[in-house]
Image: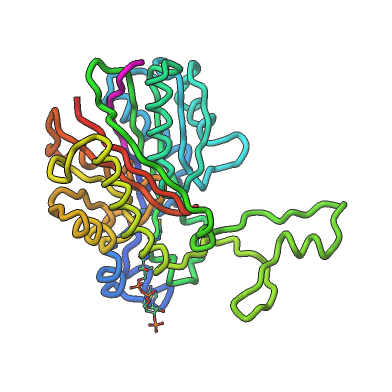
Amino acid sequence: MSEVKLLGTGASVPEKIVTNHDLARLVETSDEWIRTRTGICRRHIVTGESLTSMSVDAAKKALDASGLSPLNLDMIIVATLTPDEPLPNASSAVQKALGAVNAFCFDLSAACSGFVYALGCGAMYIKGGAAKHVLVIGAEILSKIVNWEDRTTCILFGDGAGAAVLGPSEEPGFLGMSMGTDGSRGHTLKMFERDIDNPFMTDAQRAAANMEADADGNLRPKSRYVYMDGSEVFKFAVKKVPESIQQVLKEQQVTVEDVDHFVLHQANYRIIESVAKRLKASMDKFIITIDEYGNTSAASVPLALDELMHSGKVKKGELIMISGFGGGLTWGSILMRIV
Ligand code: COA
């Protein structure tokens, strides 16, 4: 059994910045509403980048920071719900672009918890001896699944990619994790992709597969855009995130005070504030990137982690708590030590 540590991180966001004022020209909203309700000031939206190009850019930076070449990688995981194409998967496209020919690759789908799950997965492969150097990426182009006419969702999301490289270690850098899922509440964050439609179906079967009832009971095609019950997701997050963090702390026999930095999924500034309050932790320990990037789903935690690692605030021996939550509903927390 090998110990595991974080070797390096990287980030990449699209060049195009879309401000709240830009959105106020598209839908009925205002900079003031968006800032006060979410903490978001701007987000980066793809105009020429692809999920693969952002992922590769972030991966190269993470590899540089780790002092490794793509040939050192033996595993690549990309957490995403918006791959450029379902086939080939995003991680294989990244492997090709990097020339990481020694790595086996797969994508992981767990919405905004995706990166945290992928990091846990990569660490377990190393601990179990099945991999040595693992590249973990969280990347999204949420702008392609957002309804730009729906002010309740389009103001929240952004695009980007973040990467981390894990490797073997003498000292324990990956201390513990706690993951959870509540599929019974999956309907609070959802999106349908393609119709099930083949020559062997009856019209009734086609309708059953591809239509759903609206609030008035009328049938309509399932939404191809992100649907979200914002207040339900909010309530879920402020309850589950502190619980999952507390569970990891308890298992590792450390306290909230012992944690030096909290890297949470950036969905809403008020959610982070509320988690800090419930944990009785100082907001100074929480990295905030939501103002700049909005909610970038699986990319949000690695973007925030990269910002923290480059902030000059992190010292050897410090503890970092990473926590994600989102569609599924899913949640997960990981405690790491910088070694
Ligand atoms: N601009 C202006 N007004 C808006 C608006 C916008 N962009 N979006 C919604 N509103 C309106 C609503 O229509 C509502 O009007 P009404 O009172 O006349 O009905 C009012 O603002 C309040 O809406 P509400 O949904 O109660 O606001 P809120 O304070 O709950 O904030 C969210 C909404 C989405 C910001 C918040 O619920 C949230 O962040 N939820 C979690 C989302 C999330 O984390 N999603 C991803 C999970 S990974």
Instruction: Please say if 298 is above or below 71.
Output: below
The image quarter in which residue 59 lies:
top left
Residue 42: percent from left, percent from top = 30, 60
* Principal secondary structure, stretch drawn in magenta: strand
Query: Does the magenta-highlighted stretch encompass residue 3?
Result: yes
Q: Quadrant of ligand 1?
A: bottom left
Tell me what residue is drawn at x 18 percent, y 35 percent: 319
Frontmost residue, 266 versus 33:
266
Query: On the picture, is 215 further left or further right than 63?
Result: right
Frontmost residue, 282 versus 243:
243
How is colour applied across the structure in the image? rainbow
Query: Does the magenta-highlighted stretch encompass residue 172?
Result: no
Residue 8: percent from left, percent from top = 28, 28
| Bounds of the magenta segment | 1-10
- Number of callouts in the render? 0
Residue 153: percent from left, percent from top = 44, 66
